[in-house]
Image (spheres, rainbow, N blue to C red):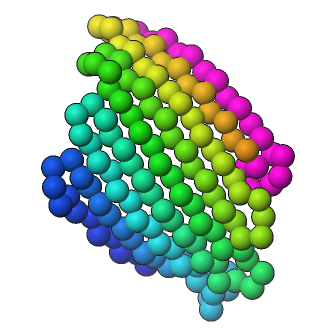
């Protein structure tokens, strides 16, 4: 396996990066090539992030994969934050996988309450392989 990454912060709040790599397979003549680029930007109470990734499967009969992700978070105040994210994966020749989620967290002293709801459609790029998960958690720090 070989990989390289570059990241930098050209201005306050902005982070940009990218990477490329190659991962060996059982077929030594068909290494898989990976690349990704991303950016995050934080301004005030908002943070936004984007990422684009590709996998070029070089083994015979393997479908290439492309994924796009984004997320946004908002700190309402020091104690309350809300976020949303989405991740889509396009596996050449199959249905697109779509995953999204929303979360909220509130802290008060040593107590934290968190909730999230995530949905996934066509998981593993398989039609009608859907899932939904909702969770509420309460914790205390002593």
Left or right side of 24 for 7 = left
From the viewer's perspective, is residue 48 above or below residue 80? Answer: below
From the viewer's perspective, is residue 50 above or below residue 86? Answer: below
List x then y, in percent, for residue 80.
Answer: 35, 18
Is 137 included in the stretch rendered in magenta?
yes
Left or right side of 94 for 68 = left
List x then y, in percent, for residue 49.
Answer: 39, 48
Q: Nearer the viewer, residue 83 or 131?
A: 83
Task: Specify the quadrant of the image occupied by residue 31.
Answer: bottom right
List x then y, in percent, for residue 104.
Answer: 46, 22
Task: Give the residue displayed 59% in from the left and 40% down from the top.
Answer: 100
Task: Give the residue displayed 20% in from the left and 58% down from the top.
Answer: 9
List x then y, in percent, for residue 72.
Answer: 41, 39
Is 45 included in the stretch rendered in magenta?
no
Q: Nearer the viewer, residue 127 or 58?
A: 127
Q: Is residue 141 in sight in this rendering? A: no
From the viewer's perspective, is residue 28 above or below residue 38? Answer: below
Residue lying furthest bottom: 29
Quadrant for the C terminus in the image: top left
Q: Is residue 11 in sight in this rendering? A: yes
Task: Specify the quadrant of the image occupied by residue 45.
Answer: top left
Range shown magenta? 122-142
Task: Give the residue displayed 53% in from the left and 30% down from the top.
Answer: 102
């Amino acid at each position: 396996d070989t990989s390289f990454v570059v990241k930098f912060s050209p201005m306050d709040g902005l982070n940009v990066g990218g990477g490329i790599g190659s991962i060996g397979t059982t077929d030594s003549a068909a290494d898989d090539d990976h690349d990704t680029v991303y950016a995050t930007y934080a301004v005030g109470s908002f943070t936004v992030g984007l990422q684009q990734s590709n996998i070029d499967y070089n083994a015979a009969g393997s479908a290439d994969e492309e994924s796009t992700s984004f997320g946004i978070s908002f700190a309402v105040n020091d104690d309350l934050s809300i976020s949303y994210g989405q991740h889509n994966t396009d596996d050449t020749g199959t249905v697109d996988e779509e995953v999204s989620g929303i979360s909220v967290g509130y802290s008060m002293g040593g107590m934290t309450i968190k909730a999230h709801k995530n949905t996934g459609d066509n998981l593993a790029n398989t039609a009608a392989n859907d899932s939904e998960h909702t969770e509420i958690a309460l914790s205390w720090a002593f």
